[in-house]
Image: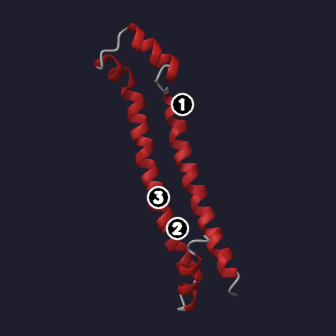
């Protein structure tokens, strides 16, 4: 919020209401959340394809053993994928709430 304080000030002084200002910041955070969702999908695909990639890259018994030592099995069960999706949703929601509260807190100083 410290870096966006000037933007909030200008919007407030030109007459934008508090809900409009906070919704614009929430929109930006939502766009970041969509980027996080793309990253989570990429991570899920990577975990799905990990065993296949190891075998395609010439993974013999030694390579597979080293990969298991480094990453574990490299596979997620359905609960792991659910947890991955849940983490993305929770982080996005926390960011949106924090953004809204932060904007309202800055706007409260001008009232």
Q: Earlier along the polypeptide chain: callout 3 or callout 1?
A: 3
Local packing at callout 1 (Cα closer than 10 Å; few below 14, some 14-19, many 20+) is: few
The label nearer to you, 2 versus 3, is 3
Looking at the image, residue 53 sits to the left or right of residue 88; the answer is: left
**Could you say which is closer to the camera, residue 63 or residue 18?**
63
Q: How is the image coloured?
A: secondary structure
x, y percent for residue 64: 42, 14
Residue 39, picture quadrant: top left
- Local secondary structure at mark 2: helix
* Measured Cα–Cα span from mark 3 to mark 1: 25 Å
Q: Earlier along the polypeptide chain: callout 2 or callout 1?
A: 2
> What residue is disc 1 on?
79
Contact (CB < 8 A) between labels 2 and 3? no
Q: Residue 32 carries which label?
A: 3
Looking at the image, residue 44 sits to the left or right of residue 55; the answer is: right
- Local secondary structure at mark 1: helix
Quarter of the image with the C terminus in it: bottom right
Q: Name the residue furthest top.
A: 61
* Measured Cα–Cα span from mark 2 to mark 3: 10 Å
The label nearer to you, 2 versus 1, is 2
Q: Is residue 72 visible?
A: no
The label nearer to you, 3 versus 1, is 3
Q: Is residue 96 visible?
A: yes
Quarter of the image with the N terminus in it: bottom right
> What residue is disc 2 on?
26
């Amino acid at each position: 919020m410290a870096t966006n304080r000037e933007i909030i000030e200008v919007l407030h002084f030109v007459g934008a209401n508090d809900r409009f200002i906070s919704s614009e910041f929430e929109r930006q955070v939502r766009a970041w959340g969509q980027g996080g969702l793309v990253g989570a999908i990429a991570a899920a695909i990577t975990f799905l394809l990990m065993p296949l990639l190891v075998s395609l890259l010439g993974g013999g018994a030694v390579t597979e053993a080293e990969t298991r030592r480094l990453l574990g099995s490299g596979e997620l069960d359905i609960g792991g994928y659910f947890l991955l999706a849940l983490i993305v949703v929770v982080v996005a929601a926390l960011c949106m709430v924090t953004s809204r509260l932060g904007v309202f807190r800055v706007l409260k100083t001008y009232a």
